[in-house]
Image (cartoon, rainbow, N blue to C red):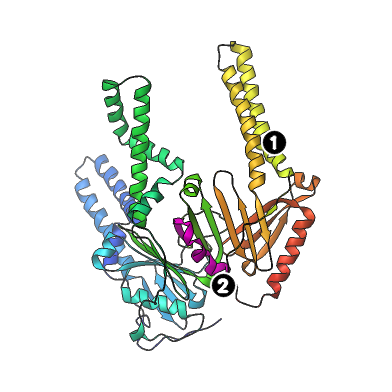
Amino acid sequence: MTMQGDPPASILASPQRQLPVAIVAEFFGGAALRQFAETMLPALLVGFAAGGRLTLVLVPVAVVVFLGGVVLRWWRTRFWVERGELVLERGVLRRTRLQVPLDRIQQISTEQGLIQQLFDVRKVSIDSAGSVDVEFSLTAVSNAVVAELRQLIVGADTARPVDPEAIAEPRWGDTLVHMGTRDLIVVGLVRPGGQIVSAVVALLGLGLGQAVDSFVESRITGTLAAATFAVVGVGLGALMLVGGAVLRDHDLTVWRSERGLRLTAGLVTKREQFARIERVQLVRRRANPLERLLGRTTVLLAQASALAGNSSSTAPTTQNFLVPSAPNATLDGLTGLFIGRTLPAPTRMISARSRWRWGLYGAVWPSLVVGAGGAVVLAANGPMSLGWPLLVVAALVLVGGLATSRLAHRRWRWDIDGSALRTRHGVLIDRHTDVELRKIQSVEVRRSWWQRRNGLATITFRTAGGSVAIPHLDGETAASMRDGVLAIVERTKGPWM
């Protein structure tokens, strides 16, 4: 492990506290407000139980105790760099000391909420992929501290000393992606339809649905009323989604440098993320039907992190460098940095037996259950009951499920060469995953009882940023892939991250 001494006159050479504005920022944070409510509730209950007058005493005491705890936690939290390690001491009654080697830190990200923007400070989070959460989370530190942390972490692999006078933002070259307001409107509209339904439900809960319903009942009736209500609801839901996208991804820009990518975005809460070339473990791309129609793809660069696990999620988290609905023209610039070249579409197919298995569990069995229920209802209540509609639903499930399983099999493609693995699958949502073989940490070949009977297997490749699985391969092909990939990994001499 490369050790790095403190540079002379370094900002982080001696223990220091967060800026005092951290007290205000933490007080208005979600967790602190919940703790405040938990502190106030017993005081209110005891006060009311004692006749109400005691409330005038207990409530101020609870407020003072809570604020005192926030101030004391701020005072007892200190951080610094010592012998190549980032050190954090915190705790009031129970003191903890966390030490993270600089060359083991995987992620550094910053955010600026309204309070941080008002005082020109930043919240910084650091993750070493060694726990189920971020190791460091400092609520309010100066821009100079953030800049030096970034310099130390970026330079830790090469053990270069840091000159405090030379601390500056790295030089960023080409702008790969920039999303204006029009692009963000598209981003909001191409979100999955389930989010629109959720937004409509939220609007109904706020009482807006009742207002629309009242207007409809007083002016229009029948089918037109239902259509008007649906249009208004979906329109308001789409407006909420667009507004959320504009607030979250305002002025989203991705720059390229010699070290990787940098993303900045946000209107109310400004965020900044980095993706270093050597630490990106795999590239995931996803496009729903609307995105495909508009020539856009959501790109996720999964970096090494304990938070990543085996998830294939495309949620924007600390370890996930996410570019939502990027124009397809930018994909080569985003993914080519990490794979080394533009990969052709995968061509190999999985076993044809997979469609029969998917059809059995996704079509035959559900249709039999629904059909049996319809037959029972029909026999018990006669032809005017819900029996016939249930039988129609069973037939639709059977036909639709068999068609979907056939299409899913046709769209499941994979390919592997001397340096990279790529997969593509999905019926409605088109999903791609690209990973360099040298990034793979383990390979697992798994066989269910059905696969053993049919000579098939599922092979899973795991990296520090997630995993990719290929189902229902011929057993001999899966075993050969496992041995070949592991041999390539063992021969690779370069760093895997």
Residue 182 x/y as whole percent: 34, 52
Asked whether, in this view, residue 2 is left or right of residue 232, the answer is right
Assess disc 2: are there few (<14), some (14-19) or many (≥20) residues with their C-alpha within 10 Å of its C-alpha: some
Q: Number of marks in the image?
A: 2
Residue 312 x/y as whole percent: 55, 54
Residue bearing mark 1: 360
Task: State the predominant SS element of the stretch in magenta.
Answer: helix
Mark number, residue 331: none
Report the span colored magenta.
321-340
Q: For the C terminus, give its image quadrant.
A: bottom right
Q: Is residue 296 on the magenta stretch?
A: no
Name which quarter of the figure residue 477 lies in: bottom right
Q: CA distance from mark 1 to mark 2?
A: 42 Å
- Name the foreground residue: 455 vs 57: 455
Q: Which element is circle 1 on? A: helix
Q: Is residue 329 on the magenta stretch?
A: yes
Name which quarter of the figure residue 89 lies in: bottom left
Which label's residue is closer to the chain start, 1 or 2? 1
Is residue 310 visible in this depiction of the protein? no
Residue 452 x/y as whole percent: 79, 48
Looking at the image, is 410 positioned above or below residue 168? above
Residue at image position (30%, 46%) is 41
Looking at the image, is 433 positioned above or below residue 48? below
Query: What residue type is disc 2 on?
Result: Met
Query: What residue type is disc 1 on?
Result: Leu
Circles 1 and 2, Cβ within 8 Å, touching? The answer is no
Is residue 166 visible in this depiction of the protein? yes
Residue bearing mark 2: 497
